[in-house]
Image (cartoon, rainbow, N blue to C red):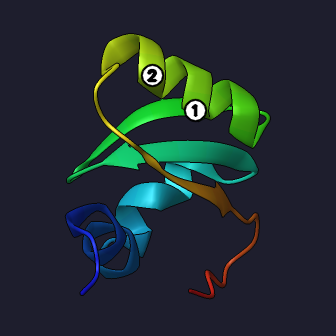
């Protein structure tokens, strides 16, 4: 079984393009942290939603987003 956050991540590459070159933290169907490092994105997410465990992902630059 996959998480709601992962399903949203793989289904919405067009919504994630604006974060190219950044690390994102996703909870359910929302980006809740965006930073230059995964650690910083996670910390931002934990400040906003301390009881949640975010999905962390790096959004690559360029035209192709490989999931």
In this rendering, position of residue 53 left or right of residue 19:
left
Q: Is residue 9 left or right of residue 25?
A: left
Assign the N terminus to one quadrant of the image.
Answer: bottom left
**Rendered view: 48 above or below 7:** above
Residue 18 on image: x %, y %: 53, 48
Rounded to the nearest angstrom, the CA distance separating label 1 from label 2 is 6 Å
- Residue ID at (49%, 43%): 25
Q: Where does residue 20 sit, x and y in percent of width and height?
A: 66, 54
Which residue is at a point 67% across and 46% down the rendered structure image? 23
Q: Nearer the viewer, residue 1 or 31?
A: 1
* Residue with the mark numbered 1: 42
As drawn, 16 above or below 2: above
| Kind of element beneath mark 1 | helix
Say above or below: 21 vs 44: below
Name the side, left or right, on which 46 lies relative to 22.
Answer: left
Q: Which one is in front, 67 or 28?
A: 28
Circle on res. 46: 2
Q: Quadrant of residue 13?
A: bottom left
């Amino acid at each position: 079984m996959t998480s709601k956050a992962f399903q949203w991540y793989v289904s919405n590459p067009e919504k994630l393009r604006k974060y190219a070159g950044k690390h994102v933290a996703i909870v359910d169907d929302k980006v809740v942290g965006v930073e230059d490092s995964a650690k910083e994105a996670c910390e931002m997410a934990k400040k906003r939603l301390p009881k949640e465990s975010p999905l962390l992902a790096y959004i690559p630059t360029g035209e192709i987003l490989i999931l």
